[in-house]
Amino acid sequence: MAITCDQVRHECATKSHRDALMTTTDHLQFDKSWADFLLPEFDKDYMKSLEDFLHEEKDRGKVIFPLSSLWFNALNSTPLDKVRVVILGQDPYPTPGHAHGLCFSVMPEVSPIPKSLTNIFKELNDDLGINNQNGNLQNWANQGVLLLNSVLTVEQGQAKSHHGKGWEIFTDKVISVVNALERPVVFVLWGAYAQKKGAMIDASRHLVICSPHPSPLSAYRGFLGSRPFSKINHFLKQKGQSEINWAV
């Protein structure tokens, strides 16, 4: 069971600004199925340093994306016991109105769709004949596709501005938790960054799909034509699971 956005807003209004920034044991912002594995992370030094950094950035007037109630949206949208696929991104979109806590995904009203997502949709259309026009991937998350960024926050207009502040350690823990599951999961690693982060994954038990990143700078080096969506569905079907409906 997840905490709703209305509950988050209520708590943000009644707690101190600092307490509202991060999850505590009394203030969950991610689905409770993750709690036993992830709550201990919030007592570690790296997370306290990250909390201090985010608090200081807000005090300096920096605009941070996405909204704090959406920092853990990927975990909130895809409970651990429902995870079937993991798609790993880097950090949120730094453009106002875009990021909402799911990697590669944007809010429904965003137009034009970001270029990397445009290439993802182009490959999806070539692979399975699905022609998505809306960049919101919530429907994927609802079916068990964990859309996880390595870094969960970003400063407005400054891509990669929150790299190296501690989020990577936290999301490494998320990956290790999924990797430890007994059931097979599909890990989708687009680009060298994701592939390096995914080095811990046990490819003898899980399906690991690697290709260049869908960015316009690299999509034509092997992402386009890689047919990841049909590969995912074929694997899931082989394992007796339902296929993902990739339409949004």
Image: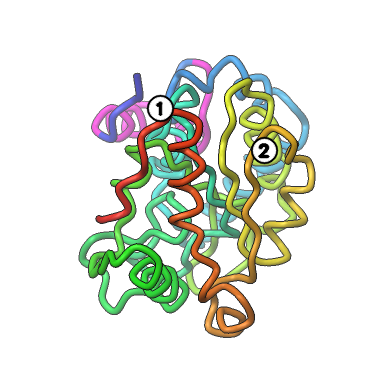
Residue nearer the viewer, 105 or 242: 242
Q: Which quadrant holds residue 221? A: bottom right
Q: Amino acid at mark 1?
A: Lys
Q: Which residues are magenta?
A: 6-25
**Label 1: few (<14), some (14–19) or many (≥20) C-alpha neighbours in 10 Å:** few
Q: Which residue is mark 1?
A: 15
Q: Position of residue 13 (x, y in %)?
A: 31, 33
Name the quadrant of the C terminus. bottom left
Q: Which secondary structure is most common in the magenta stretch? A: helix
Q: Position of residue 47 (x, y in %)?
A: 69, 35
Q: Amino acid at mark 2?
A: Phe
Residue nearer the viewer, 62 or 116: 116
Name the quadrant of the N terminus. top left
**Identity of the residue drawn at 73% across and 41% down:** 203
Q: Position of residue 38 (x, y in %)?
A: 61, 24
Residue 11: in magenta span: yes
217 left or right of 106 in image: right
Residue 95, placed above or below residue 241: below
Q: Which mark is residue 105?
A: none
Mark 2 vs 1, N-terminal side: 1
Q: Position of residue 239 (x, y in %)?
A: 50, 31
